[in-house]
Amino acid sequence: MKPTVGRIVHYMNLGDADGRFPPETQAAIITGVHWGSNIGEPEESRYDVDLHIFYRTGQFDMLKVPFSPTAKRGHWTWPPP
């Protein structure tokens, strides 16, 4: 599926360096789509996206986030059906 502006996706945050706060999945909205260079990969992997991420304690914007088909730190993925 091709990522487009306005779609809701999941973003796996990085957590903290000392492991006190492990990575968690956050809700996010795609605010921009950029053509990537992963030709031959699944369609989603060909794009990096800009995200507006919703945390329990606030909101954050992140630019050019890569795709992963499974939850992976610092990547976006589609929500499960």
Image (cartoon, rainbow, N blue to C red):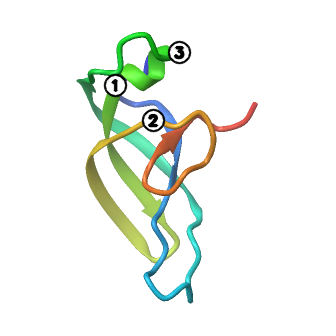
Say which residue label 2 marks: 67
Amino acid marked by disc 3: Met
Foreground of the two, 25 or 7: 25
Cα–Cα gap, marks 1 and 2: 7 Å
- Point out the residue furthest to the right here: 81
- Marks 1,2: beta carbons within 8 A: yes
Q: Position of residue 81 (x, y in %)?
A: 76, 30
Cα–Cα gap, marks 3 and 1: 11 Å
Label number found at residue 1 = 3
- What's the residue at 59%, 65% (across, down)? 24
Cα–Cα gap, marks 2 and 3: 12 Å
The kind of secondary structure element at disc 3 is loop
Q: Position of residue 50 (x, y in %)?
A: 29, 41
Vertical relation: 49 (above or below) 56: above
Characterize the local packing of mark 3: few (<14), some (14-19) or many (20 or more) Cα atoms within 10 angstroms.
Answer: few
Vertical relation: 24 (above or below) 75: below
- What's the residue at 50%, 57% (across, down)? 73
- Total number of numbered discs in the rendering: 3
- What's the residue at 37%, 65% (across, down)? 59
Characterize the local packing of mark 2: few (<14), some (14-19) or many (20 or more) Cα atoms within 10 angstroms.
Answer: many
Mark 1 vs 2, N-terminal side? 1
The kind of secondary structure element at disc 1 is strand
Say which residue label 1 marks: 47
Vertical relation: 40 (above or below) 76: above
Amino acid marked by disc 1: Tyr
